[in-house]
Amino acid sequence: MDGAESLVRTAIACGIKVCFANPGTTEMPLVAAIDRVDGVRPVLGLFEGVCSGAADGYARMTGRPAMTLLHLGPGFANSIANFHNARRARSPVLNVIGDHATWHAAFDAPLTSDILSLARPVSGWIRSVRSAERLAEDTAEAIAAAGTYPGRVATLIVPSNCQWDPAEGPAEPLTLQPPAPVSDEAVELAAEFLQSGARPALFLGGPALQGQALASVARIAEATGCGLVCETFPARVERGPGRPAVARLPYFPEQALEALFQFTSIVIVGARKPVAFFGYPDKSSSLIPTGVKVTRLAEPEQDVAGALEALASLLSAPLSPAAAPYPERPPRPKGPINSATIGAAFAAVAPENCIVMEEGATSGFNFFVHTGGAPTHTYLSLTGGSIGQGLPCATGAAIACPERKVICLQADGGGLYTLQALWTNVRESLDVVTLICNNRRYRILQIELARAGITEPGPKALSLTSLENPEIDWVKLAQGMGTPAVRVDDAEVLARELARTLSEPGPHLIEMRME
């Protein structure tokens, strides 16, 4: 057995089922090992950012790491943006990067680079393998590091000779440590905040927005009447009838401060303290309004579900809270396409238990609000703010949950970063319906220009925010990737086409013309 086969067999033993790959010469032994050992599904991404984004989507939906296989430093560099997003989502990922043979590195070949320095900013764990004999154990340690609650990107750099040299065999999986419990004092203080404040709120992130933790949130809200707010870009939220309605913190700092100013006290659970995405002159970076009291129940790395259950018990919260009122499904919308009618179209025709990956940028800001009447669904968002996550994250989610429909709401500007995911969707026969918000501009940048006081930008500034001249034809782009596509320019047709594509198997794309 060579080192590559020991890595693959170890990965299978540790629960790895999928490898999102864009390999090169230095990874050929690993490609051969994946070919001859049953157990890992190889998925080719035409661009490395598709691989990292898909691994993120897969991890968010399964809670387990996928594997990525990338080629040297330059190949990995193409994937960094979506590993940044995966790190912010706290997604477990095994990131394997091939490297030159150890004895070849000294010759400074054209593709030689400092992979460690490139990978360190987006990795929660990192190691460069030194021998084939150690490769299996290093792999087991990397997978355990990736799976450490709540999840990390674990990067394993594997020189090619460590792949082809002899190895003894696979390593056994390592036992994962459970998350650290919160203190009794933290639970008691959170209860005090929720009971003594005139208008208390829970500020939620990470695992607090799904599963048993979200059920505890519903119990706490029933017992205290507290408000429920989540991070601006949550990794995953379970939504729909029978689940508590959680408001999403607005993106712009003025709106976020206004949203939180209504509360007298805030208990943070599974999230960092909210801060503005960018610094603005004479504006606070913190989004906690002056005078609002704050305490923390659980850090993202602590046992969030256990902390919420303990808090619910201390508050004597009802075990079966009354079902929160939930809006009825709206009728199919009519009129122009905008964030409101896109949300209404989704809510009107979406199937039960679908998955929504939203990277709609300005078109997506209100999508969350206008999907209140939708059936039960899982909502994923752009966690790290690095655009180009939506399409590949939807790909990974579809591979993770083949029994569920996936809908990707994607801004045109961000979609152009990773449109190669459309090809992977076709090759893998994935049930992904992509909605492209085509306003032919980087609208968010035009808004930021106005916020900076530039209300009448000149031709040079406009040229850096416009996606016209030439106009991009998403129908032709999709068809070139093998994806059936249509263009719509009003909400009634959008709802009809969305219903049709959701009723058919395989990938589809709908280009939504917006002004």
Image (cartoon, grey):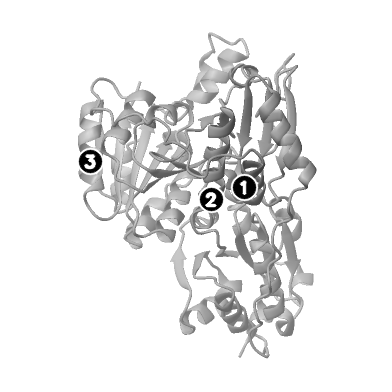
Residue closest to the eye, 443 or 293? 293
User: Would you name the residue on which mark 3 appears?
Assistant: 499
Of badges 2 and 3, the one in the foreground is 2
- Contact (Cβ within 8 Å) of mark 1 with mark 2: yes
The amino acid type of the residue labelled 2 equals Gln
Task: Give the CA distance from mark 1 to mark 3.
Answer: 39 Å
Left or right: residue 161 compared with residue 233: right
Q: Indicate which disc, 1 or 2, sits on the residue closer to the N terminus.
A: 2
Instruction: Identify the residue shown where x is 49% and y is 70%.
Output: 17
Residue closest to the eye, 305 or 15? 305
Of badges 1 and 2, the one in the foreground is 1
For the residue carrying disc 2, how many other residues have a C-alpha within 10 Å: few (<14), some (14-19), or many (20+)?
Answer: some
Task: Give the CA distance from mark 1 to mark 2.
Answer: 8 Å
Residue 184: % across, % down: 77, 46
Instruction: Identify the residue shown where x is 63% and y is 84%.
Output: 170
* Label 2: which secondary element: helix
Task: Give the CA distance from mark 2 to mark 3.
Answer: 32 Å
* Label 1: which secondary element: helix
User: Would you name the residue on which mark 2 appears?
Assistant: 212
Residue 492: % across, % down: 21, 28
